[in-house]
Amino acid sequence: MTIQEKIISLRVALNSHNYNYYVLDNASISDFDFDIQLKELEKLEKENPQFFDLNSPTQRVGGAITKNFETVVHKNRMYSLDNSYSKEDLLDWEKRVQKVLGTTETSYTCELKFDGASINLTYQKGQFIKAVTRGDGFQGDDVTPNIKTILSIPLTLDGDFVSNFEMRGEIILPIEGFNKMNSERVAKGEEEYRNPRNTASGSLKLQDSAEVAKRPLDCLLYQVVTEERKYKTHFESLESARKVGFKVPKTITIAKSIDEVFNFIEKWDSKRHDLPYETDGVVIKINNLLQQEELGYTSKAPRWAIAYKFKAEQVATILHKITYQVGRTGAITPVANLVPVQLAGTTVKRASLHNADQIEKLDIRVGDVVFVEKGGEIIPKIIAVDFSKRPANLVATKYTEHCPECYTELIRTEGDAKHYCPNEFGCAPQITGRIQHYISRKAMNIDGLGGETVDLLRKEGFIQNYADLYDLKVEQVIPLERMAEKSAQNMIVGIEKSKEIPFEKVLFALGIRFVGETVAKKLVKHFKSIDNLMTATFDELITVDEIGDRIAQSIIDFSSDLGNIQLINRLKSYGVQLEVSAESLENQTNKLAGQIFVVSGVFYQMSRNELKKSIEDNGGKVSSSISKKTNFIIAGDNMGPSKLAKAENLGIEIISEQDFIDKISKE
Ligand code: AMP
Ligand code: ZN
């Protein structure tokens, strides 16, 4: 055997022992013998550096330090899941799905919903390439060195699979491992970790991968994302993935009807506490992959999947105090401070009370015994007061009249559930909050500047608004606490780079009340520049698709404020993008104005998303189901038969992918 052959055979053997132990839970070698083989491989690799391989089992012990995790744009967006809470919800979902597909022949997979941190693993030609966190769904952090230390994740695949793909899964911390970590911390006099989920996701961002290697993390896989149409069903793709090395939970089950789905749900709702890890529900997916493609995505979640949430756990505790928080828009949120209580694995001390109406509705008073519930959200909710336990002398709650931060009198406009502090430019959390929003990832994505630094810069009097960021100088910030020269420079570079951020993100970043990401996109598409937007009348604004009175009024209020006008002028003078770039205007036409398209089937020249974008760029609209209003159906292969019949019935013109391409390229 040559040295190279020896090295390869050791790698294969060690990989297979890892697989047997960590994926199949069935050890094929003693720890002692495993270590001997690993040491031997290490030695051979060291003596023969020409055979180095990043994916060798020796590369999994950790040791690499990452100071800044690189941001990576996902090749395929990582979506959320829509939620359901009852059999009725599921039946509604089935109805919607079958309507889009134009068939009642649907079958499902049921999987447990794992509660951890989602991860996207890229593989090419059987080799692990990189691991990226979900982030905001569009882009996440490259955490490759940390992920490599998780031994159930294969670095080299064993057998035939698709060649280019992403594997999606959840990084979890099994309960036993979590408890062990906590008892070690207690023994060292350190504070306990709050719950497995947060600890798992925190672990991914540790700088020292050797530290990650010590944590008993695991990775459960649930989705193969690929353009290669090798497998017909989701189930098949996962079964094959398991064979080549991935830890795909055996609990995945095919269901032929919603009744069968419900059997699965009921079984696991009672058995879930016996599992070695936490689960908060079930994920139901359409099994047929062509049908998945056909169904596509809404702006936030796949149409072909839905989560079912198990009933949240409840617990009783005492309301100790109500405090108030001010958000970046000046909105006031009342917060219930509770006598700490254990709930679903975490200690709960605070719960949101939403607004004055909610307080009134609950009739909640300081001293009351209250029921707290924890759903998927981080902040628990108060469900009800236990009136049978109310002491006789409790005082009715009076909502605060003044801002807890600046003591300005609060206002509440008609039809608005929230109270606001109107002191927009003088109320500290509003100032800080607006700048923090401006620099955040989904907005201007300014690297090198964090939320705490913003607060510090404001306290020091360097910034009062987001335009001030562009006047900051390296020399000014270096003397600040915790600010090294390098980080000061990074910050200034990050701010400078934000001048390239496209207008739609800038508009979102401005933090105009009710103008979220989607609304900002719609406005940019219609108005093209901040000047057009700020001079638009109320009537013009409400003619825009999905812009109602409330949003329109908020834009008018923003635009007529002198302070805002000055801010915008300053941003302009610094070169921030306040109009659609000439380049992206070029690709946009009005050729399809007023026309509504339904896209159905499988396509070959363009991806479904490219098709949709192209329709929108050319002024058309995309709809997900066929109706009388539909003008064209772009039909690919495999379009559902009853959909076709419906289209023909309504006399809607059916065109091919090529017809569409001809249509938009024609002058
Ligand atoms: P949510 O964050 O509530 O919108 O739920 C979506 C997340 O559920 C995904 O990002 C995944 O990380 C997670 N998830 C857990 N288990 C599964 C599963 N079996 N299939 C799909 N997603 C899952
Ligand atoms: Zn205030």
Image (cartoon, rainbow, N blue to C red):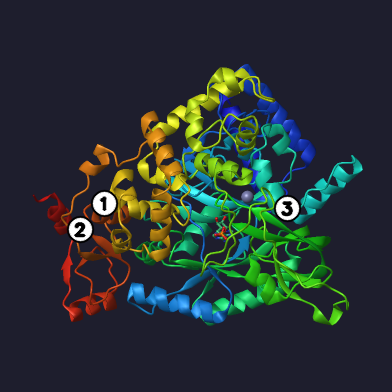
Res. 657 mark: 2
Residue underneath mark 1: 606
Res. 158 mark: none
Instruction: Give the Cα distance between marks 2 and 3.
Output: 48 Å
Q: Secondary structure at mark 3?
A: helix
For the residue marked with disc 2, what is the amino acid? Glu
Q: Quadrant of residue 361?
A: bottom right
Would you call the spot at circle 1 few (<14 residues within 10 Å), some (14-19), or many (20 or more)?
A: some
Q: Is residue 541 left or right of residue 374?
A: left
Instruction: Give the Cα distance between marks 1 and 3.
Output: 42 Å
For ligand 1, tell me if the residue under mark 1 lies within 8 Å: no
Residue at image x 59%, y 41%? 432
For ligand 1, tell me if the residue under mark 2 lies within 8 Å: no
For the residue marked with disc 1, what is the amino acid? Met
Q: Is residue 146 visible?
A: yes
Q: Residue furthest left?
A: 667
For the residue marked with disc 3, what is the amino acid? Pro
Residue at image x 52%, y 47%? 120
* Percent position of residue 637, x then y: 25, 64
CB of mark 2 within 8 Å of CB of mark 1? yes
Q: Is residue 176 left or right of residue 503?
A: right
Q: Which of 73/509 is in front? A: 509
Q: Secondary structure at mark 2?
A: helix
Residue underneath mark 3: 196
Choose the circle earlier in sequence order: 1 or 3: 3
